Amino acid sequence: MTTRLDAPVGIVGAGPVGLITALRLAGLGVPSVLLESDPHLVKQGSKACLIQGDVLEVLDKVGCARTIAEEGVTWTVARTYVRNQEIRAAEYPRGQGFGPFVNISQHRIEQVLAEAVEAEPLCDLRWGHRVTGLAQDADSVTARVVTELGEEDLVFTHLVACDGVRSGLRDLVGVEWTGYTHQDRFLITDIKAELPLAKERHFHYDPVFNPGRQLVMHPQPDDIWRIDWQLPPDADIEAERADGRFDQRVRAVIGDVPYEVDWVSTYRFHQRVVDRLRVGRVLFAGDAAHALPPYGSRGMNSGIQDADNLAWKIALVRSGVVGEELLETYHRERYAAALENLRVTEATIRFMVPPNRLRRWTRAVLLRLSRTLGPARKHVNSGRMAEPYTYTDSPLVRTGHPLLGAFAPDGPVVVDGRQTRLRTLLGAGFVGLVFASDASEAADVAEAAWARPWDVPARLVAVLPPGASADGLSPEITVATAVDDALEVYGTGWWLVRPDGHLAARDGLGESFPSALRASAGIVGSGLVNERSGQ
């Protein structure tokens, strides 16, 4: 290959997706330059206000999850109301890690990530840098950048476009922005108030304070509440703020509780995706690649998963182990994830905002029935919450087990006398998890895995039952002792986990560990020798 490996990766956009892309690349030893057109971090209301627990695992890989989880509001119940009557309380298990959902403003997430980026030697964050032109060839990408000092050309091995829903890079590259923008307007108001409400998600259909439409409330830290109204076509929020009707609007929801306005904005949501997430050495991620309604909180969460999927693939390509074709799997996997998100959110929107008279009548009947008839309630769609995508149709993922392609299940383990979680052992590279009944069985599996050369670095982790001894295992194997039966879902034998935490292959499918490792890294043939041998 003739790629200029002395050049960094370029990232355009210092939102959460761009920032986590830079940090994940740095964790894999890849330098990056992050270009942001704004002169500094700008607060724009709460914007995204929820991070899903599995997505926090991505931030945990770069040391940022704990701060966000501790500052945020963790919740486990989503309540749905019709005409102010609660019809459903969906409960989500807390799980082993950070809880199912943590509410915190996007701005605060950006602050935490930006501080980590600025402290990381492999990350170069440049404010006030606007990309106005792009050129690429077989070896590199050149970005024309405008700053207050003038223009300059910057050369990168790859460029990741994370410049948001109004991405200028889409036009520069020429990708198609497929889908539509919804015509209904919505109002976001963040208020500071001590409300007598459980700090959970509250979704209202046809409430007395927004008749015929819906409203959702999300708690934030420091007694901030986000209230999101669907607006009638003739609503004029600026006029409402001027003549006092805005206060009446808020009071209709919260009553006489004192409050302060923290943020007000209106928006129209999008249902869009680019036709190509990869064009040569330019890759699209986050809202630059796909735009979604807020219901279900799939926007920022899926964007962070884009970054986690892409970072290890760029790192592997730059290492010379595999060619640029590996990056095509980024498009294939994350485009499929975007389509799934669009499918889910489209079903929600067609229920929330019925497109024709028949659907409006059907929804009205269903909502009315849901107040008294239990079976009708499961059909009231208030948004299916975000969850990691399972790569069921990827050339990098084997088939033959329902867990393959999924985010690796978690469970408590003890490592070196300290209790932690299995997922904390993942993320730095490929990991082979060896589930065995004792040390002898784990050693046999490990020796079989080491019997042939590996083409890409990987670590082995032996997961043993509670109380099992690790005597006889090589010191090159990390030993994790299970605390309970949470990890029994894996069975016995080895599993291969990708750097993004998804299960790629498993024992018992007629494939050796080295062969599975090569295939899951997109390698054709053999290149490097076994890292264990030091050769």
Image: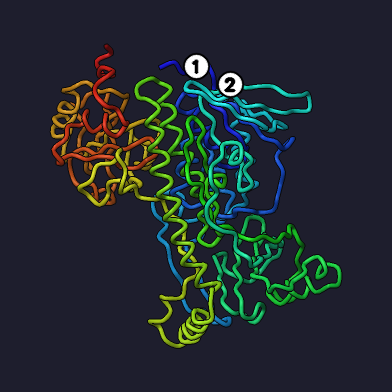
Q: Residue 4 carries which label?
A: 1
Question: What x and y, as percent, mark residue 120?
Answer: 57, 26
Quadrant containing the N terminus in the rendered view: top left
**Mark 2 falls on what kind of element?**
strand
Q: Which of marks 2 and 1 is nearer the N terminus?
A: 1
Residue 186 placement, left or right of 371:
right
Image quadrant where residue 131 sits:
top right
Q: In this view, does 485 lie above or below 429?
A: below
Image quadrant where residue 433 sits:
top left
Residue 260 placement, left or right of 314:
right
Question: What x and y, as percent, mark residue 190?
Answer: 69, 60
Residue 216 seen by the camera: yes
Q: Which mark is residue 348?
A: none
The residue type indicated by label 2 comes to: Val
Mark 2–mark 1 CB contact (< 8 Å)? yes
* Residue of label 2: 155
Q: Residue at x 52, y 41 (%)?
A: 285
Q: Residue at x 42, y 57 (%)?
A: 94
Q: In this view, does 48 lie above or below 371?
A: above
Q: Which residue is drawn at 48% across and 86% down?
A: 365
Residue 82 placement, left or right of 457:
right
